Amino acid sequence: MSTNNILADSFSGNRILFLDGGMGTQLQSKGLQPGETPETWNLTRPDDIRAVHESYLASGADVVYTNTFGANRAKYHGDIPLSDIIESAISIARDAANAAGGERFVALDVGPTGRLLKPAGDFEFDAAYDAFAEQVSIGAKAGADIVAIETISDTYELKAAVLAAKENSSLPVIATVALGNDGRLLTGADVECVAAILEGLRVDAIGLNCGFGPDLMLPFVKRLARATSRPLAVKPNAGLPKAEDGRTKFTVGPEDFAKDVQELVKAGATIVGGCCGTSPDHIAALSRLLKSGEAAHVIPRDAVLSRTVIASGSRTLEIPFNDSIIIGERINPTGKKKLKAALTEGDVAYVLREAVSQAEAGAHVLDVNVGVPGLDEPTVLTSTVQAVQSVTDLPLQIDTSNTEALERALRSYNGKALVNSVNGKEESLSSVLPLVAKYGGAVVALTLDESGIPETAEGRFEIARKIVTRGLEHGLTPDDFVIDVLCLAVSAEPSSANVILDAMRLVRERLGCRTCLGVSNISFGLPSRPFLNATFYTLALNAGLSAGIINPLSAEMMTAYRAYRALTGKDAQCAEWIEHAPAPQIATMPSGERPREPKAKNEKRFDEPSELFNSIRHGFKIDAAAQAKVLLSGGKPPLAVIGEDIVPALETVGRGFESGTIFLPQLLMAADAAGAAFDEVRSALPADAVADKGKVILATVKGDIHDIGKNICRALLENYGFKVIDLGRDVPPETIVAAAKREQVHLVGLSALMTTTVGFMEETIRALHAEVPGCEVTVGGAVLTAEYAASIKADHYTKDAMELVRLAEKVLA
């Protein structure tokens, strides 16, 4: 039976596919030293690597993961060529699998790059893709059966890895992510967001690994099972780590581990194994229990996917069938001179302000169109999509008729986009649908073809059916389509409104598809357009409009939307209506813009945030610097700019991060914007006029080369006014102690990601306490908990960068 048939059999629920357990734990027991690169053992100690594989295969594993977790160009910098490391890993695993007999498989283990991708970090998406592509290409040619992407904590990096796997091999792909204690990835995505993105990219199995034990993983597996019909893969840790006799040990034994994983199987998992702390004994117990137990459970596809879902890198949105969402239309240069000029002149800040204003006004999705004659549309659309994603977590509608621009934008988009659009013309069908199928997404389907736009509702429905039928050939479903029956002006076509509404009803009744409309087209050429638009919008909502492409800054349109939802019971307790109840003067406003309270010229309300405050809050780095300069040139004292604008903005963002309303990318963008404003303030003062809040040493401990978390902490601390002494990664205890003495610091932050290096963390803490009295030590990292921190005598445990800032403010006050 071929690999794909075995996997198909497992995925169907007829059998469970057993993966192996932790590699690092086993290598430690064989003498792997902290800081030593495990992948080099493929060449220096191949018999030990083979022994690990053999032990897992003997314990019942169907699949062994190669010793290549860190074998990518971004992370590995040793002298042995990557190709030798990966080829040797495949050969060792293959020999062990063949010797075990039966149908056993080799999975190329693909771990993260260890770098944070832009805009939150400094690593380019294409560089991450190249690193993964090289690893996959070598592994596939060497004979891997499966590509297993694991322990990813950023959806953007996840997308780069999946594209690399699918474009550089024909192997099935299992993709698992590592959640934090809050149930989200480092960059904010929850399991529903991960499922939407991976489902769109058509991986073969979706799941979770590392992070915590099977008991804590259970609620997230249950949620994942409701969000995808793909097979679910789980590789939990053997519980939580604790320090014992200077070594890291995990708390869940083999039998308890197997019983807990059985609950994951009942929740929907069909591919099971172990991660940190698990051993052949854990896999043996799992195999014994589940091979004689009930079959795996798979939720039927139609029970999961009878909905239309899009996503950004951290937020999922369902386009409803029996309700409606708002697609903000303002980032489209058609009829907008200022936006057209901004795009032509490269004024990104203007575009970002448009994005944020629509998000704050209530848009659920933002349309992005840069169609200005003479522009390099593929380049400008891609850069604009990336820029907009840096300041909002709303999903985007990528709006272009340029196929090259569409592909480049879809490839660089972090999430699962809404594509605008495909139509019934053969050229469009053959060029757009394959891209939607490849990159994942929902697509707006326009009911026009080579003959134009049909005059009748039935004619438009037939084109919609033709498009959906063609989509089926590419693996798309009716739920992947949002049908736009096209809104023609009633000034030119008096029957247009009725035809549109009838066509929408036909699409819903006969195809079961969602619908959308560019609503304001209905009033083109007529006076008092806002009132016509709002009235037609209400009619369309009543006819089942799923998504209105409107101006969310229009008071009339937003009032119509909220009134409709309140009156039809879609707004529970009329809460949204009450919150946004329109001012009395709305009926006399012809502008179509949101009414504002009157105020005198140049008068600022005492409670109204400054432009600098808002720019920092939204991560507008260029604007923040410019606005700080304006305040300073207008006579505001530099220290007042810091105390009244910059620090309050950072505090607001920090509270949002702590409460889970904003996530790491937005936090870091705000920190960058604050840093730009600080630079302007510092330039207006003598060098010693702005005192640092205090000094903090940061270091990744000896043996550990991972520094994403440390670098995030450094960026945030610096922008909160602390002086950071960053000692880098793989730092021995004596170096940290010497720096603490020399700099006379009172707070040291230590980071470790690998269980093999936590021993050095304990040694460093012991040395600091002994040799630097009065210096407090805080620790953090993926393998640590508050309990573990206490067990190694750390003074504090900080789970994230914002918590470290709060601690520094307290300790160094």
Image (cartoon, rainbow, N blue to C red):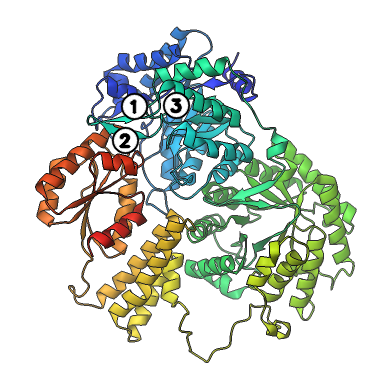
Residue that label 2 marks = 754
Indicate the secondary structure of the residue bearing disc 2.
loop
Q: For residue 813, what is the image quadrant? A: bottom left
Q: Earlier in the sequence, mark 1 or mark 3?
A: 1
Q: Nearer the viewer, residue 142 or 356?
A: 356
Q: Return the residue at label 1.
A: 24
The amino acid pointed to by label 3 is Gly
Task: Compare marks 2 and 3 and give the one earlier in the sequence.
Answer: 3
Mark 2 and mark 1 lie on one chain; the one further toward the N terminus is 1
Q: Quadrant of the N terminus?
A: top right
Out of 434 and 62, give the one closest to the viewer. 62
**Residue tagged by mark 3?**
274
Q: Position of residue 76 (x, y in %)?
A: 32, 34
Q: Residue furthest bottom?
A: 600
Label 1–label 3 contact, CB within 8 A: no
Q: Is residue 50 left or right of residue 97?
A: left
Q: Nearer the viewer, mark 1 or mark 3?
A: 3
Name the amino acid, label 2: Met
**Residue 767 coordinates in the image, percent (x, y):** 13, 42
The alpha-carbon separation of the residues under discs 2 and 3 comes to 16 Å
| Disc 2 + disc 1, Cβ < 8 Å | yes
Q: Amino acid at mark 1?
A: Gly
| Point 44% across, 14% down: residue | 59
Q: Picture coordinates of residue 542 (x, y %)?
A: 81, 62
| In this view, 498 is above or below 101 | below
